[in-house]
Amino acid sequence: MPTIHMICSPVGVGKTAYATKLAADIGAVRFSIDDWISELFFPDRPMPLTYDWAVERAKRCEARIMAVSRDLLALGTDVVWDLGFMERAQRRRILGDIEGWCYQVRLHALEAPKEIRRERVRRRNVERTDSYAIEVTDEIFDFMEARSEPVADGEAADVIRIDNI
């Protein structure tokens, strides 16, 4: 049965690197929200960037990612969603939206200490490695950190926990 792999973690854990490797290992198609937003919307973003502006565009990207994913799943192809899933409400909303799809869902809960993640983000901003799509300033890191909620036991039937990656 095709599987939806939801990569859940706070900023700086290494979601994109993990999702890229997972997709390659299992022959899945990876969707990264940062890639979509940066390519589709960042050239026209307001300055300063606002949370409401970003959230509205992220929801549009989610809707398209879900539609394309449903087509891929129907063809027997697994999908890897690197969409953040930092907030419990977002995970609940997405799980509710896909409840009737009849595909297996696996939550991959990635964790690492805050200061290690902050340093990774600072380094990524400078080095602009393959996982770089959007600059994450210390202010953005702190803003997102305040909204990050770990995956709780019982939140989904199949949770894979990976600590200190």
Image (cartoon, rainbow, N blue to C red):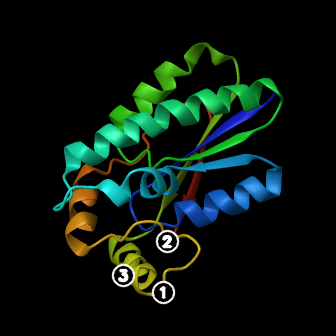
The residue depicted at 34 percent of the width and 70 percent of the height is: 114
Does 83 appear above or below 65? below
User: Front-most of 163 and 87?
Assistant: 87
- Dot 2 or dot 3, earlier in sequence: 3
- The CA span between labels 2 and 3 is 11 Å
| Image location of residue 35, percent across then percent down | 51, 57
The residue depicted at 47 percent of the width and 66 percent of the height is: 133
Give residue 81's mark. none
Please tell me whether mark 2 or mark 3 is closer to you in this view.
Answer: 2
> Within 10 Å of the Cα at label 3, are there few (<14), some (14-19), or many (20+) other Cα atoms?
some
| Image location of residue 16, percent across then percent down | 56, 61
Quarter the N terminus occupies: top right
User: Front-most of 129 and 49?
Assistant: 49
- Dot 1 or dot 2, earlier in sequence: 1
> Within 10 Å of the Cα at label 1, are there few (<14), some (14-19), or many (20+) other Cα atoms?
few
The residue depicted at 24 percent of the width and 74 percent of the height is: 138
Left or right for 133, reference 17: left
- Secondary element at tag 1: helix
- The CA span between labels 1 and 3 is 9 Å
Q: Is residue 45 visible in this depiction of the protein?
A: yes
In the rendered image, which residue does mark 1 sit on? Answer: 127
Give residue 122's mark. 3
The residue depicted at 76 percent of the width and 46 percent of the height is: 28
Q: Is residue 153 visible in this depiction of the protein?
A: no
Quarter the C terminus occupies: bottom right
Query: Which residue is at the far top?
Result: 100
Please tell me whether mark 1 or mark 3 is closer to you in this view.
Answer: 1
Quarter occupied by residue 60: top left
> Within 10 Å of the Cα at label 2, are there few (<14), some (14-19), or many (20+) other Cα atoms?
some
In the rendered image, which residue does mark 2 sit on? Answer: 132
